[in-house]
Image: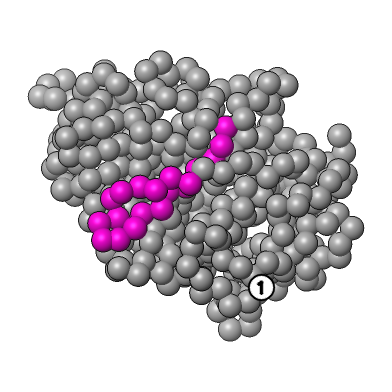
Amino acid sequence: MSSDSPPDTVNPILTYGETTAPPDEPSSTVTSSYNASPSPVSTPPSTSLSWPPDGKLTLDWIYNLMSVFDWASRNLPPVNFPSVLPVSVFDSLVLTASKILHKEPNCVRIDDVDSDSMVVVVGDLHGQLHDTLFLLRDAGFPSENRVFVFNGDYVDRGAWGLETFLLLLAWKVFLPHRVYLLRGNHESKYCTSVYGFEKEVLIKYGDKGKHVYRKCLGCFEGLPLATIIAGNVYTAHGGLFRSIPATPSKRSKKKNRRISLTPEINPFSLGSLEELSKARRSVLDPPWEGQNLIPGDVLWSDPSMSPGLSPNTERGIGLLWGPDCTEEFLKKFNLKLIIRSHEGPDAREKRPGFAGMDEGYTIDHTVETGKLITLFSAPDYPQFQATVERYNNKGAYVVLKPPEFNNPEFHSFEAILPRPKVQAYYDYEEVIDSDEELDLASMVTTPSDIIVST
Ligand SMILES: [Mn+2]
């Protein structure tokens, strides 16, 4: 297939010209129409995007960005992307967003929500631009009364990771206190080099590709790790994390350098929110060894049906945590709900005891104090598959409403199909399983005092 062939048909669902609010929502604060007809013969909604001279993004600017990305994905070959979003505009957007993101704490507390507000939580998106656009329109765009928390994994696997990520950055810049972007395990150097995003960027930006990729990685490093919504709901990409015992004293580098054998009373005890707040998240790849383990846990861990905390041997990084840990965490921090993401239909196929991801969400643990939910927002995932048979999963998002914001309303949705024809940016026939069997040796890590984990 040629990567620049236009789509076969026009998808009738994607008509952004409508000004009506989604049927189940009150009239939104949207004031201007979002004008993009995805017709393959239409002219572009606007010419090349430019950065506003005063540096202030407007709603119209973002609507235009969405229209242009959608149009370009259907009508232009990927190598023409710089004519859509010149590298100077990319630079301004990423720089502005990075400044905001790097200032946010590891765990962002979203407390300024009131009786008029709702919070939309979104799971993995994986470069599925058209599904992301549908989700935003279906849920209602971010606004003063509609807070969004995105749970990470914006890029990789799907062919429009760059567009998806930049679109969310634009919303972040426009409404920094209403849109929160958390880091996923795919927002890393390792994952993007294996699952397509690096190659996607290099192809789309040509000789500027390396620069663009580096800037994206720098921005990924700034993404916060978790949110707590209205004091009740913890969200993070992977989930819970371990407690890190006090740093062992450093031995002389010259002699008697040995691995510390100091016994730890419990090498796997649940970490506290205070420990989370102190972790160093600004790393290209969260380390799987050493002292800075909390970011890797938060981004890579999975729930288990067995009690306790144990190493996540299947993934090679992060933890598995049982229902007892969910209960302990909720109770200790006075929470009612955990919303995590990170497992799609492919991952769930190999997890006996867990529900499948057909509807885009699962309720994994129901304990005395509350619940643990997995939320996945990429329908018909993964975009590229070697077999004819597909998972046909729906994606979902969660709406949390006042007064407690802890009773999740699930909204499942189907994929926007057919997708524009494009080539994958990774070898999807070789890389079958998402995230599993990490080649740890290839991951970048900072040499430090190595503590042997179990
Ligand atoms: Mn993930």
Report the magenta residues as a range. 393-411
Q: In which quarter of the image is the N terminus?
A: top right
- Visible residue check, residue 453: no
The spot of residue 197 in percent (x, y) is: 63, 42
Q: Residue at position x 51%, y 70% from top?
A: 28
Please name the residue that numbered disc 1 is placed on: 33
Q: Residue at position x 40%, y 36% from top?
A: 374
Q: Is residue 82 above or below residue 233?
A: below
| Mark 1 sits near ligand 1, with its Cβ under 8 Å away | no
Q: Residue at position x 81%, y 50% from top?
A: 10
Is 75 inside the magenta-drawn segment? no
Q: Is residue 41 above or below residue 126?
A: below
Q: Is residue 236 left or right of residue 188?
A: left
Residue situated in front as seen by the camera: 445 or 35: 35
Residue situated in front as seen by the camera: 107 or 61: 61
User: Which of the 4 image quadrants contains residue 57?
Assistant: bottom right
The spot of residue 311 in percent (x, y) is: 31, 22
